[in-house]
Image (spheres, rainbow, N blue to C red):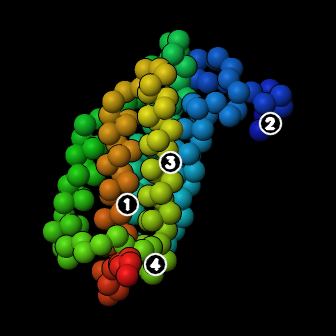
Amino acid sequence: MSKIYTKTGDTGTTALIGGARVPKDSPQVEAYGAVDELISWIGVLRAHKVSDTQAALLRRIQECLMTCAALLAAGDNTKKKLPGIAGNDIDILEKAIDAMQNNLPPLKAFVLPAAPPAAALCHVARSVCRRAERGAVTVARQSALPENALIYLNRLSDFLFSLARQLSADAGIADDYWLPE
């Protein structure tokens, strides 16, 4: 039986794909760590009340995010062939966003995250997605990162926002707008 622990990270470093060792608080590790967290939050969202179609799309999103994490974890000198984010993956998100937006009332102000629980989880995932995107931008300035990975993360946060609004509408709950006085 192989052990889950290797002890190679006990001194605060970790290996990138390709073998290069970097500090665990490096921008690359921060970025793919945020993507990993996002994958988990989307898993929590899948475990809540969403339609079978939404659950299938969320699973596909998790797969694409695994690809994003791998791209972020690749060292510049890696010789390993990695998958990419296809333009079709971005198109799927855009079509889903457009379909939801066509069913929803126009936005009147900023939306405060609220019920139902699945919608609130979408907002948590959306904010984590934005953090992952910021981290990916930092990595892209320092090393090669396929442009579609950045585009995907940007579009995904829009998708999660739209899905939150759709889940609220499906539950008969109106958007809770922030209307400062």
Q: Tell me which amino acid carries mark 3.
A: Arg
Helix, strand, or loop for circle 2?
Answer: loop
**Nearest to N terminus: mark 3 or mark 2:** 2
What separation in Å lies between label 1 and label 4 (alpha carbons)?
Answer: 14 Å
What residue type is disc 1 on?
Leu
Give residue 5's mark.
2
Residue 145, position as x, y percentages in the image: 42, 26
Residue at which label 1 appears: 160
- The one nearer the camera, 16 or 52, is 16
How far separated are the C-alphas under marks 3 and 4?
20 Å
The answer to which of marks 4 and 2 sits earlier in the sequence is: 2
The residue at 56%/55% (across/down) is 40
Q: Earlier in the sequence, mark 3 or mark 1?
A: 3
Residue pushed farthest bottom?
A: 172
Q: Amino acid at mark 2?
A: Tyr
Instruction: In the rendered view, tell whether residue 44 sits above or below residue 113.
Output: above
Amino acid carrying mark 4 in the image:
Ala
> Dividing the image into 4 quarters, which one contains the C terminus?
bottom left
Is residue 51 among the parts visible in the rendering? no
